Structure formats: C-alpha cells, structure tokens
Amino acid sequence: MSLQPYAVRISSPAAKVLAALPEHAEETVWDLLDAAAADPSGFCQWDPADPEGEDVRIASAGRLSVIYFVNRPLRHLSVLDIVWLG
C-alpha cells in the first residue's frame, strides 16, 4: 500500500507571487509541487549546512524555485516562497 501524497498549503506571500506568474510558470509551480508532494525529500535542502533545517527544501526548474517546509507528522508541505527570475 502506497502512502498518499502530502497535502500542499501555500502561504499568503507565495499565493500572491503565484497569482502574478504567467500561465506557463504557474503550471511549472504546480508540477514541482506535485513532485514534492509525492516525495518531499526528493529535492535538496535549502541550506545543507543546517542539519536542523533538513525539512526546508527547494524545488527548482530552470529560473523557477519553490521553497517549502515539510511537516512530516501532519504530512503537509507548506510553501514558504516562490521565486521566478523571468
């Protein structure tokens, strides 16, 4: 039996960025979040030098990055920020 993907929660600041993105960039954000929800530790840490921050991750594709926190006990991903250099 496989586990359900993690639920995704988007912070207010990240939601504002998401709303302002062009359609193709927004689709990429959702693709990244789908991948992260299926395997939250599949993307690298935001700061690998911080062992206590192992649950702050960054999913990137080209010039687009999604920074999220993995809440393992509740099986949630909390999107902290979205960065698009477009």
Image (tube, rainbow, N blue to C red):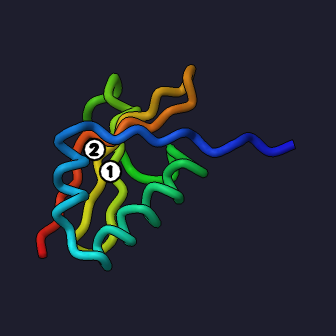
Can you name the residue that lies furthest to the left here? Answer: 85
The image quarter in which residue 56 lies: top left
- Residue 67, how many percent across, how many down? 29, 47
* Residue at x-position 32% and y-position 28%: 53
Q: Is residue 76 left or right of residue 38?
A: left
- Tag 1 secondary structure: strand
Up/down of 32 relative to 22, above or below: above
Question: What number is the disc on residue 28?
Answer: none
Amino acid carrying label 1: it is Ile
Q: Earlier in the sequence, mark 1 or mark 2?
A: 2
Q: Quadrant of the N terminus?
A: top right
Q: Is residue 5 left or right of residue 59?
A: right
Q: In which quarter of the image is the C terminus?
A: bottom left
Can you name the residue that lies furthest to the bottom here? Answer: 24
* Residue at x-position 29% and y-position 76%: 23
Up/down of 51 relative to 45, above or below: above
- For the residue pair 37 and 39, the one nearer the viewer reads as 37
Q: Are marks 1 and 2 in contact (CB under 8 Å)?
A: yes
The image quarter in which residue 73 lies: top right
Up/down of 81 relative to 70, above or below: below
Q: Is residue 71 left or right of residue 81?
A: right
Q: In this view, does 64 lie to the left or right of 5?
A: left
Residue that label 1 marks: 58
Question: What number is the disc on residue 46?
Answer: 2
- Residue 30, how many percent across, how many down? 42, 62
- Label 2 environment density (alpha carbons within 10 Å; few <14, some 14–19, many ≥20): some
* Residue at x-position 50% and y-position 33%: 76
Amino acid carrying label 2: it is Trp
Q: How far apart are marks 1 and 2 (CA)?
A: 5 Å
* Residue at x-position 31% and y-position 79%: 24
- Tag 2 secondary structure: loop
